[in-house]
Structure formats: structure tokens, C-alpha cells
Amino acid sequence: MKVDREKFTFMEKMFIIKENRRRNENGEKKLFKLRKKVNEMYFEKGIKKNKIVQKKGMSKTFVIKWTQSPEQDFMEDRRGWPNGKRRKWDDRTVNIIKEIHNSLMDDPTKFYIGATAIVQEWRKEYPNVEIPPLRTIGRILAYLHLSAKCKRGRNKGAARYLCYPEHTIYNLLGGRVLEADFIVKYFTNRTKPLSFIGFSFKKEPRIRYYKRTEGQTSREFKRCCDYFLKRFEIPDYIKMDNGAAMIGSVSGKRNISVVMMYLLKHQIIPIFAVPRKPFSQASIEGNNSVFSRKFWNKIHFKSIDEIDEKLEWFNKASIRYLGYEPPREEKRVKKDFTPKVYFIRQVREDKETENGYINVLNEKIKISTSFINFFVLAEWNLNEERLYIHFEKEKKPEVIKEMEFKINKRSNKKYIKSGPLSFGI
């Protein structure tokens, strides 16, 4: 049914949407009966059109159309194809999708079996056959009972309401932001847990990559970063959690950690996520879920060597699935690089003073009480040794506080020895 939706009110549009859903779910047969019922209510029972709209929950356009004449063809069907039959894609399409899906299931080196993976295989195996849209492939998979529904978490929009500085980080700082995170898994008949580190880009070109580590240490973080930077690309920022391996001392104040120093030498600016808030690492946390579902929980591993071998299969499958290609041009040393460290923090209330505050490298920074519970972005300029607190509202950041923030003397010696003005690869 084609209608000019711009001429209807919001409620009328909602009725049309409901009508279309009802048509899809219950088929044409029920719609034929409804058309006839509306016609009878108007001509035989004398019920007014507005009352019919309210009683049946249909759009007014629908009621007007089927009350124009007492004798109408209620079985009218203008779709042009039989009910239950696809308009364009025939049985051959269904068979190809089923065949590709089964081959992906049987191949131990393949970890993705959804619509996107089927399109990629289709291009290789049937280059001269037209490929259906992803949505159509998804519907056919559901029709064949070959798709699994993923449970989606509830999104209450709290991050947006509390002004999480996502737009500033991913759009206004400029450059590529890589997210990194350690994850721990437990292996059968082994007391000692296994550690992995995951890397992901939220923005295109996207990547999902994992390496097994000997533990959650700064040395292992640097080793895996070295491998990633050489094989793929050097980002402008790396966003990570506040673990001691990354942020450093849990008691010393204003220290530059080993990982901070390592990243700054590569002209990469560290960004530390909100403590104990997984959503602030949304990209890597989402990829960790994929890692668990499609790799760790899917295979019954028998040895560490098997894990390492199949992890490489998973990485190759992920790179191919996401279509990642490293940049062609090598990153040059930035002559105007300014060493900085960013901290995403949520303003808390000090129970003793009732003031707002954030914790940056074990220093309590006083913040106006009006910002309590809101998120802020603290920028530590190491050349100036100053801290700038940014607050983002409606995608526009504003400095709400500026203060001196001296580097710890012990860290400063290492920092000066490294040469802050000569950071580069």
C-alpha cells in the first residue's frame, strides 16, 4: 500500500507501521477479512469512520479506502507474486546460501558464518552470479534455521546523558584511536590462567587482533605492541584501562609509567579509560565478546600449541571478514609532536568535604560540585606540566579547569633522559 506519509500525523504514521507489520506477520488472508469487516461496520452497522479507526486500531487512510463503496473487491492483491514466494530470489539462491554456510561450518579455519561471510565466499565461488543484499541473506538464513539470535544488552543512554567525551576523543583530537585490553581465560586441567591482549579500531578501517601473553605486565604489553605496530599500523592514540601494568604505580603520584614512556617514544598518546566502566572501552569489549563466542567457547582446545595455531586462524579470518588493509604510506616522525596523556574520569563526591573531585595518578583534583557524576577528560601536557580538564556538552568541549601538574621528580629524570623533545621511532 503506497501512501504519502508526509500528510499524516505521528499517530496515523504509527497506525500505518502497525498495519504493515500485521500484514507481514499474518499474511494477506487476514487482511482480506479486515477489509471486508471495515466495510460491513460502515455500511451495515452505520459506525462512523473515526470510531472504526479507534476500535480496530487502523489508519484513517485504510478505513476511508475500504468504505468508499459497499461492493469492493476485498481480495485485491497488487503484489504481483503469490503469497509465501520470494519476489526475486529463487531456489538456486537459497541452495547457494545453504551450501556456502555449510562449507564455512565445516572449515576449522573459518570462524564467521553470517551474511557478510557468505557474501565474501560468494564473490570467490560464484563471481558471475548476482549476490542478494545482506538483509535478504539474513532472512534466508533465518528461514533455513541457520542463524542464531544474539542477546543485546540494554542501552540506557547513561553515557550520553552524563556527557561522556566520546565525540572529543574520536573526532576532535584528530587521528586514529586504537583500543587495547588484557583478557584472562581458564584452560581445562590447568590452574594457571591464560592471558591474551586484544587490539581494535572503532573506526574504519577496523581491525580485530589478539595475541597470547605470558601475563598482564608492561613488558608483555610492549612486546605485543611492537608486533602490532610493525605488522599493521602506528595509531595516534592508544586507549586502555587503568591496570597497574599500563598506568603504573598504585601509590606514587604524578608518575610517568613505563608504558606511557614507551608509547610517547613512538609518538603515540596514551588515553586511560574510566576505571571500572567497561562501556568506556566499548570497541574492544565488543570484540572481546566476539573472541569468546567465535573462538574460545567454540573450540575444545587440547594444548597451548593448538590455541596459538588456531588463534592465528581466527586473526586471519577476522582481518578478512572486516576487510582491513594497513595504510600504504609509512607514518613519518612528527616534528611538532607534543607529549600528552589523557585520562577519562567521572566526577565523584568527596564524603568528607562534599566537593566534587577526580583522581588522576593518585592526585585528588577538586572539581565544582555541579559536575558530580558527569564525565570529564583530563589532558596532561608534559612539556608545560599542566593539567587541563575538558567537559563535553552537545559535542563541544570546554576547559572547566586548568592547573599546574608537575611530573614526579623520579619520573622526570627518566623523562628528561629519554628526551621529550626528540620522541620518535
Image (cartoon, helix red, strand yellow):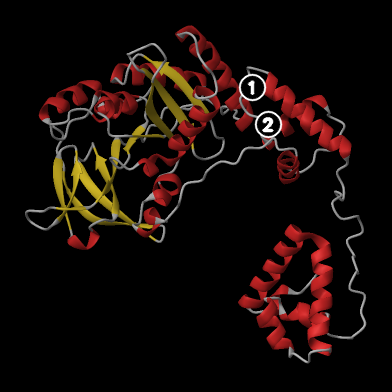
Residue 323 visible in the picture: no
Please report the residue visible at 62 percent of the width from the left and 38 percent of the height from the top.
148
Q: Secondary structure at mark 2?
A: helix
Q: Position of residue 117 (x, y in %)?
A: 68, 31
Q: Which residue is mark 1?
A: 110
Please report contact status of discs 2 and 1: CB closer than 8 Å, yes or no. Answer: yes
Q: Position of residue 424 (x, y in %)?
A: 36, 24
Can you tell which mark lies on residue 117? 2
Quadrant in the rendering for residue 319 = top right
Q: Earlier in the sequence, mark 2 or mark 1?
A: 1
Residue 19 visible in the picture: yes
Query: Of the residues shown, which amino acid type is indicated by label 1?
Result: Lys
- Closest to the observer: 302 or 325? 302
Quadrant location of the N terminus? bottom right
Instruction: Give above or below for 380 relative to 121.
Output: below
Q: Position of residue 344 (x, y in %)?
A: 30, 44
